[in-house]
Image: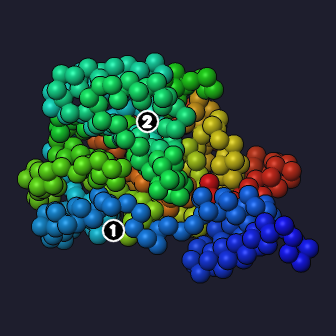
């Protein structure tokens, strides 16, 4: 059908393109994001509009999920938060100004409770992690809760599914939550059906196959959580898959970081899981038990605490981005950043440049063998000013590098699921642990030194020798950096 010589589809496209462009401007997105989306809408007719509907509409203006962990903590743990805030102020001299700032920031931005008395084990390879995780799962007596961005039912995943089915048959409460998009192609229908025939409860977070949540498919839970019997928990950067042990088909090895925690932090992780489970249609049980301060210590006179900080696209603050920025700007001697991807927002890029120009030793390590080429190319567009400022940039070449760690001086250190990129900062539901124990920090530093031996140091001369064609390619893809 034609109207004035134009098809009805073309007229509809123009109306939507203009309307969405106006909405993009009214949303006050960053200039880079606004330009990227407007270009996509007009330079890729029809498809650009569809992509914006699926990936670009600012659903953040509305509450996307029913329960946000930071809100539940603020509501049910307000007394503990207030007592801890007072303790932080009283112990400012003992804690030091840097630790005081970080604790205060994360407490105010994400209601991040501080816990003491945890026993922590760190993992830098997948084999040791899965050995311990499988052993703990086999010993479970009361409950097992798992949340993953990617659950791959390969050799590792099938073994875990077998344990979950057996434990559920024995009367253990078993709940498995996977991201609807991240595990769409990795968690087979056969694996899912095997759980339906058992007593294991399985749900998808923001399932793209659900007509109600499909509009939110660009927002994902990137968190990795396991809680066993309410007392043992795991979190960090590793999903479920055999590649975390042997590198998979594409890589010689896979370097990542994870942690096992036994102590009061397990209750915080349990609460985060239950909030996400509720947001996926599950029941949120026993608020008075899981969101209570009964297991939390308000005495912060020691400096070995742990904070678990969450952020998401509809959070009140970009809490983990603000944490990273504050750590970088507070550093006095050294900054270490490890992330598979490096697509920072302007504040992080400027903070790193300023730190290096101020005489701080700044170290940035990303993967040298990418699993995704476009973010790898885009990362190079940020390197020239960083190198000129004096930042040391390492490309890890022994395999795929997936660890997400930030360290300042000889503490604190944070690690978890949050990459140093704009998707993690603004679009995904993330979870990081902040640790204030100097012995833990020293273990991270020793591992970084090992990683450096498996990396190539990128210097300014080498960077400047990149061909103009590659630099142009990288710069073109940087236009869509806010969409990655």
Q: Quadrant of residue 239?
A: top left
Q: Using residue 284 as the reference point, say whether residue 431 is left or right of it.
A: right
Q: Quadrant of residue 455?
A: top right
Q: Helix, strand or loop at disc 1?
A: helix
Residue to which mark 1 is pinned: 109
Q: Residue 302 got which mark?
A: none
Q: Residues within 10 Å of mark 1 (few under 14, many from 20)?
A: many
Q: Is residue 338 visible?
A: no
Percent of width and height locating residue 378: 69, 53
Please identify the quadrant where the N terminus is shown.
Answer: bottom right
Q: Using residue 474 as the reference point, say whether residue 148 is left or right of it.
A: left
Question: What residue is rendered at 62% in x and 54% in y?
Answer: 484
Residue to which mark 2 is pinned: 238
Q: Residues within 10 Å of mark 2 (few under 14, many from 20)?
A: many
Q: Is residue 372 visible?
A: yes
Question: What residue is rendered at 59% in x and 29% in y?
Answer: 399
Q: Using residue 277 as the reference point, say whether residue 381 is left or right of it.
A: right
Q: Real-space Cα distance between discs 2 and 1? A: 26 Å
Q: Helix, strand or loop at disc 2?
A: loop
Percent of width and height locating residue 104: 28, 68
Classify 297 as above or below 454.
below
Q: How is the image coloured?
A: rainbow
In-front residue for pair 457/175: 175
Question: What residue is rendered at 59% in x and 59% in y?
Answer: 55
Classify 226 as above or below 79.
above
Question: What residue is rendered at 42% in x and 29% in y?
Answer: 192
In-front residue for pair 167/365: 167
Looking at the image, tell me whether mark 2 or mark 1 is earlier in sequence order. Answer: 1
Classify 322 as above or below 180.
below
């Amino acid at each position: 059908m034609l109207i004035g010589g134009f098809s009805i589809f073309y007229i509809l496209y123009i109306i939507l393109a203009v309307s969405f462009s106006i909405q993009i401007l009214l949303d006050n997105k960053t200039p880079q994001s606004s330009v990227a989306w407007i270009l996509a809408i007009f330079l890729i007719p029809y498809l650009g509009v569809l992509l914006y509907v699926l990936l670009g509409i600012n659903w953040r203006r509305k509450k996307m999920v029913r329960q946000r962990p930071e809100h539940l903590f603020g509501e049910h743990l307000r007394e503990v938060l207030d007592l801890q805030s007072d303790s932080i102020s009283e112990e400012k001299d003992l804690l030091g100004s840097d630790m005081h700032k970080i604790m205060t920031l994360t407490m105010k931005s994400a209601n991040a409770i501080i816990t003491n008395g945890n026993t922590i084990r760190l993992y830098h390879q997948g084999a040791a992690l899965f050995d311990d995780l499988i052993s703990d799962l086999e010993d479970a007596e009361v409950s097992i809760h798992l949340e993953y961005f990617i659950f791959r039912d390969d050799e590792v995943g099938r073994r875990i599914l077998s344990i979950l089915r057996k434990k559920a048959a024995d009367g253990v409460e078993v709940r498995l939550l996977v991201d609807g998009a991240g595990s769409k192609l990795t968690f087979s229908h056969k694996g899912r059906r095997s759980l339906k025939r058992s007593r294991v409860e399985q749900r998808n977070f923001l399932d793209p196959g659900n007509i109600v949540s499909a509009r939110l498919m660009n927002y994902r839970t990137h968190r990795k959580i396991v809680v066993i019997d309410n007392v043992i928990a795991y979190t960090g950067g590793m999903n479920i898959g055999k590649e975390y042990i042997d590198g998979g088909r594409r890589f010689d090895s896979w370097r990542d970081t994870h942690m096992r925690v036994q102590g009061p932090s397990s209750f915080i992780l349990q609460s985060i899981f239950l909030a996400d489970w509720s947001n996926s249609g599950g029941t949120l049980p026993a608020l008075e038990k899981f969101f209570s301060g009964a297991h939390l210590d308000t005495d912060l006179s020691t400096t070995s605490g742990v904070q678990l900080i969450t952020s998401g696209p509809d959070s009140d603050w970009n809490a983990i981005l603000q944490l990273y920025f504050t750590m970088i700007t507070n550093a006095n001697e050294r900054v270490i950043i490890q992330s598979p991807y490096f697509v920072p927002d302007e504040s992080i890029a400027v903070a790193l440049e300023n730190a290096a120009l101020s005489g701080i030793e700044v170290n940035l390590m990303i993967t040298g063998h990418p699993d995704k080429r476009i973010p790898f190319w885009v990362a190079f567009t940020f390197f020239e000013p960083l190198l000129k400022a004096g930042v040391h940039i390492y490309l890890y070449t022994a395999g795929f590098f997936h660890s997400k760690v930030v360290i300042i001086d000889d503490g604190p250190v944070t690690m978890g699921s949050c990459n140093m990129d704009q998707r993690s900062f603004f679009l995904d539901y993330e979870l990081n642990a902040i640790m204030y124990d100097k012995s833990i920090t020293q273990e991270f530093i020793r591992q970084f030194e090992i990683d450096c031996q498996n990396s190539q140091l990128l210097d300014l001369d080498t960077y400047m020798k990149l061909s103009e064609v590659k630099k142009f390619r990288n710069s073109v893809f940087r236009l869509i950096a806010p969409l990655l």
